[in-house]
Image (cartoon, rainbow, N blue to C red):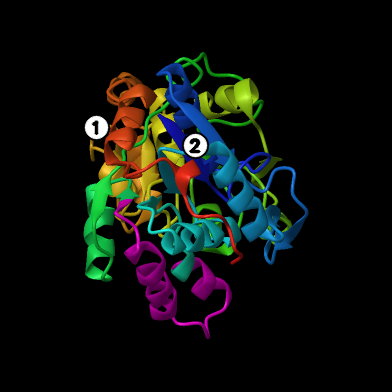
């Protein structure tokens, strides 16, 4: 199969969407498929306001049209609702090509957290329009599917997530030279992630924040007892995560939270709110605790067995996730290279 994968989220961004896509592309290629990733890479870009590390492609229509015409895909999957995703949607609609999409980020809630005068319902109206043209929209878990269905999105199917259990695995503690126990947050340091909720908790030991973002400077000044380590990737990230005693996930807006799987693979129990994402990953009393009192959940998680966390993570693999992804795709009825000659738009 020749697959065109259109995404506004790609390297060098560091987030769960990019991580999932990188693993999916690697598995697809290992399975013998040919993948053309159409991303902002190699294009003039501008920063997304409030997310400077996210670069948006300029003149996306021309790039998308050329790449789809030259590659001649058997299937088209649109990952994001950004400029490239919009251009790909328009191209497919004009040619009556079937395509699939996926839902990764709660932008209606993210925008509302930053701009309270923008109602969440406006964001979901846009999402209904964007994804409504797709044959299928892939979501990461059943609770999220129910939430999106309640918002009026249709043709929702499951695309699960996996974890690299070779990189993320239990290790001997001692990587961080801080007072134990270590309560760790990993992710973007931004208002929509509710990192302040974590830092405000009364907990023993040390709070550690791994990641960066627009809220870091203010939070670092306000919580001088916490350790802010900035971005870490690869082996350094895996070692740091495995050194935690509890992974605290304060976000209420994530659609899943790939880092939850990575923490479990490291044998680190989770403390989180009882919301979509953690609800789908955490087995309460076994691999973590979910509680509106986040501090109570964090303290209780200290008593859990790391071996149970590791066993839970071993039940997932990126190959199985990728097989589910390919089963959800909508093949073109005719080769893309036989499409009408481009006339603009």
- Residue ID at (43%, 52%): 104
Position of the C terminus, as image quadrant, is bottom right
Q: Which residue is mark 2?
A: 21
Residue 246: quarter of image: top left
* Residue 137 sits above or below residue 207 on the image: below
Q: Picture coordinates of residue 168 (x, y %)?
A: 48, 21
Identify the residue at the far bottom of this view.
Answer: 117
Identify the residue at the far right of this view.
Answer: 44
Magenta stretch, overall SS: helix
Residue 127 can be seen, yes or no: yes
Residue 290 relative to residue 189: left or right = left
Q: Earlier in the sequence, mark 1 or mark 2?
A: 2
Q: Picture coordinates of residue 17 (x, y %)?
A: 50, 44
* Residue 191 sits above or below residue 232 on the image: below
Q: Using the numbered discs, state the Cα–Cα distance from disc 1 to disc 2 in whole angstroms.
A: 29 Å
Say whether residue 282 is magenta: no
Residue segment shown in magenta = 109-137
Q: Picture coordinates of residue 329 (x, y %)?
A: 32, 41
- Residue ID at (50%, 59%): 91
* Residue 312 sits above or below residue 230 on the image: above
Q: Which mark is residue 286?
A: 1
* Residue 190 sits above or below residue 296 on the image: below
- Residue ID at (68%, 43%): 228
Of residue 64 and residue 13, the one placed in the foreground of this image is 64
């Amino acid at each position: 199969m020749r697959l065109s994968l259109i995404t506004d989220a790609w390297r060098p961004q560091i987030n769960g969407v990019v991580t999932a896509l990188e693993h999916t592309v690697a598995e697809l290629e290992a399975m013998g498929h040919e993948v053309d990733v159409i991303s902002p890479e190699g294009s003039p870009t501008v920063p997304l306001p409030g997310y400077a590390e996210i670069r948006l492609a300029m003149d996306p229509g021309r790039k998308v049209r050329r790449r789809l015409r030259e590659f001649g895909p058997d299937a088209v999957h649109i990952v994001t609702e950004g400029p490239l995703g919009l251009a790909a949607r328009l191209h497919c609609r004009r040619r009556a090509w079937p395509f699939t999409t996926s839902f990764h980020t709660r932008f209606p809630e993210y925008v509302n957290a930053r701009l309270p005068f923008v109602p969440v319902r406006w964001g979901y109206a846009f999402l209904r329009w964007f994804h409504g043209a797709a044959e299928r929209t892939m979501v990461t878990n059943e609770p999220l599917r129910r939430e999106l269905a309640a918002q009026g999105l249709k043709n929702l199917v499951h695309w699960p997530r996996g974890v690299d259990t070779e990189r993320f695995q239990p290790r001997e503690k001692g990587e961080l030279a801080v007072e134990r126990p270590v309560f760790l947050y990993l992710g973007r340091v931004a208002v929509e992630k509710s990192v302040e909720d974590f830092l405000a908790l009364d907990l023993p030991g040390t709070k550690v924040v791994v990641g960066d973002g627009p809220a870091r400077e203010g939070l670092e000044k306000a919580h001088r007892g916490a350790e802010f380590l900035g971005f870490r990737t690869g082996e350094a990230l895996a070692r740091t995560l495995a050194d935690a005693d509890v992974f605290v996930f304060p976000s209420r807006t994530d659609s899943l939270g790939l880092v939850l799987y990575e923490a479990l693979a490291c044998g680190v129990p989770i403390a989180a709110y009882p919301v979509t994402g953690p609800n789908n990953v955490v087995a309460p009393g076994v691999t973590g605790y979910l509680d509106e009192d986040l501090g109570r959940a964090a303290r209780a998680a200290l008593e859990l067995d790391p071996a149970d966390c590791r066993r839970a993570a071993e039940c997932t693999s990126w190959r199985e996730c990728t097989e589910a992804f390919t089963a959800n795709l909508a093949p073109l009825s005719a080769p893309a290279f036989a499409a009408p000659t481009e006339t603009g738009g």
